[in-house]
Amino acid sequence: MFTWGVNAGTMPRMSKKPRKNIVVIGGGTGTFTILSGLKRYPVDLTAIVAMSDSGGSTGMLRDELGVLPPGDVVRCLVALSESDTLMRKLMDYRFDSGNLKGHRFGNLLLSALEKTAGSFDEAVEKASEILRLDGRVIPVTLDKVNLMAQVGTDIIRGEEQIQMAKLNGSLKHIWLEPVGRANPKALKALRDADAIIIGPGNFYASLVPNLLVRKIPETILKSKAEKIFVCNLMTKVEHTKDYTVADYTAAIEKYLGGPVDTVIYNNTTPDASVLKRYAREGDTLTSWKDLPKGRKLVGADLVAKRMVRMASKIGTPAVESSLVRHDSARLAATVAKILNIKPKR
Amino acid sequence: MFTWGVNAGTMPRMSKKPRKNIVVIGGGTGTFTILSGLKRYPVDLTAIVAMSDSGGSTGMLRDELGVLPPGDVVRCLVALSESDTLMRKLMDYRFDSGNLKGHRFGNLLLSALEKTAGSFDEAVEKASEILRLDGRVIPVTLDKVNLMAQVGTDIIRGEEQIQMAKLNGSLKHIWLEPVGRANPKALKALRDADAIIIGPGNFYASLVPNLLVRKIPETILKSKAEKIFVCNLMTKVEHTKDYTVADYTAAIEKYLGGPVDTVIYNNTTPDASVLKRYAREGDTLTSWKDLPKGRKLVGADLVAKRMVRMASKIGTPAVESSLVRHDSARLAATVAKILNIKPKR
């Protein structure tokens, strides 16, 4: 099989036309979704991953072992892995009893590798080799950062806490502590990119934390790459209440410090039954009645009809879900059309 | 690189003369030692591993997850792995804080694989692939067995407890509960073997438990293989007080139900300083003044001058140790001479 990424040095190029370098910025489920879709295209994929996760298995490992947060990196590794199903299921296995309860195996792998290899960077390299990666996963920073927010006069520490906090209208400032210095590999990937895709992803948990890392926004803006923002499908009442596509775009551009070239947004309403659960919380479908001016706009039906098999669900039967998620294949097809890329034969 | 074992089906044989099948029976440190030595010879190596371990990280995993004991299997996998040092260090990494404290990464790998693959057998296969095994590791049974002993009128349950109990003179009976049925792969390996080596290893923790599994002793005795016993270097006051080479051989043959062909024993006294620590406990060097009759006897200087790098110490500098252990290279050379095998060029 033809593999790329970690093996690029030793494998012959099969095609004369160089493949396009696509960099996806994010970290959570949305990034898993877009990577899973784009891997069906003949492109060189790089995921730049936020490093401020502080919840769940990842949070426990940060607290107990003093490691960098493995969770989002592992999900991207699984998305880009060419390994068999068992290996991918293994990475996603969550221990369900005893002292290990709640820990995901992939997270333990990355943390144990960090301890034995001596650095998170080498751990990611080795995990990429073990998982036979077709692509690259790059932590946005190798500093041990915490996401911080000032909301009114309160200071909130940690992504998990910020996720639950009501930021709407009262978010004064959001930052990383200590200031995250960019991973040089991330900067290089951004400079070499043909396309940089921000999203999809939780706005304050997966997207913004990447843009808070020093030099990342400037490097994105200076890159020759087409800058694409994949707008969130839904609003979140505590964070982005009533945001339209224009509002989301303005918000991401605020953290980016300049304009994106292209905005991909959903323009179809899912079944009312699916939206009901969100409505109870006050979350709504992102309206596309208000679109940003002066950007290339690409609207499409992007809502998954069935829940995609996410990293957390690999190996279990795909289940219909009431969650509104991006459809992996249609989102990737939308990106491919913008970049004029044909699927792998 | 030329690999064997799991890849045998896809790799061409490099030599016309078939390599000898050597089966090593044991489980603990001694098995790691002999496998590490023999892998330098052009032989097909199989380790048959006891499955009654109930202590440490392995014991915790058995109790908490209901898995089969991974520890000894993992040590043998590491011994036969062709992977790089980092991968071998990773397998041996022991978490040192938080809820994970005391767990060895390799054990977590095998247990998580057992949960995701659905069986311990498939878990070992997959781990063999991940670790690029040159050889095979076969759990002696796939039943969840506990080592049991009747000592006087007391019943002791669990290898860990039996290890600490005084068996000398009062051991009435030792058995597995439930009765372990042999792994068919173990029986096949024994039938196909050119040599079957019992030991080195802790007598009641690593060697005897293999021979308590149904059909294992008969299959060894019926095999065309040369049956070799590697006699213990030391006596253990609670278990094998004052045993000579003849006593150890008689004891193993009792559990085997018949004679071995060859006995390998140490015939050199280490420095007095090294023996002092043992003497305090009542443990002594196994005497070779009394040798078994009617067996081929091969005495050699088999005591490691320095502690070998054991599974638990990979990656840390080899340290001089006051433990009396078999020397990996000299033990393997002794076996090779008996079987007329030349080292790999």
Image (cartoon, coloured by chain):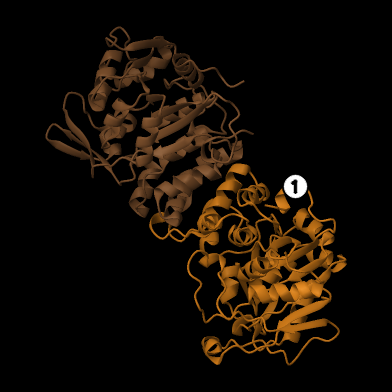
Chain colours: A orange, B brown
Q: Residue at x 34, y 11 (%)?
A: B296
Q: Residue at x 51, y 86 (%)?
A: A277
Kindly identify the amino acid type of the residue bearing the numbered disc 1.
Met
Residue A294 at x, y = what percent? 86, 84
- Residue B42 appearing in the image: yes
Q: Is residue A81 above or below residue A327?
A: above
Q: Does residue B318 appear left or right of residue B248 in this picture? A: right
Residue A32 at x, y = what percent? 63, 67
Q: Is residue B156 above or below residue B276?
A: below
Q: Is residue B39 above or below residue B101?
A: above
Q: Does residue B233 appear left or right of residue A286 in this picture? A: left
| Front position in the image: A149 or A314 | A314
| Front position in the image: A331 or A29 | A331
Q: Quadrant of residue A115?
A: top right
- The chain ID associated with circle 1 is A
Q: Mark 1, residues whose alpha carbon is within 10 Å: few (<14), some, or many (≥20)? A: few
Q: Quadrant of residue A68?
A: bottom right
Q: Quadrant of the C terminus of chain A?
A: bottom right
Residue for badge 1: A11
Q: Residue furthest front?
A: B16
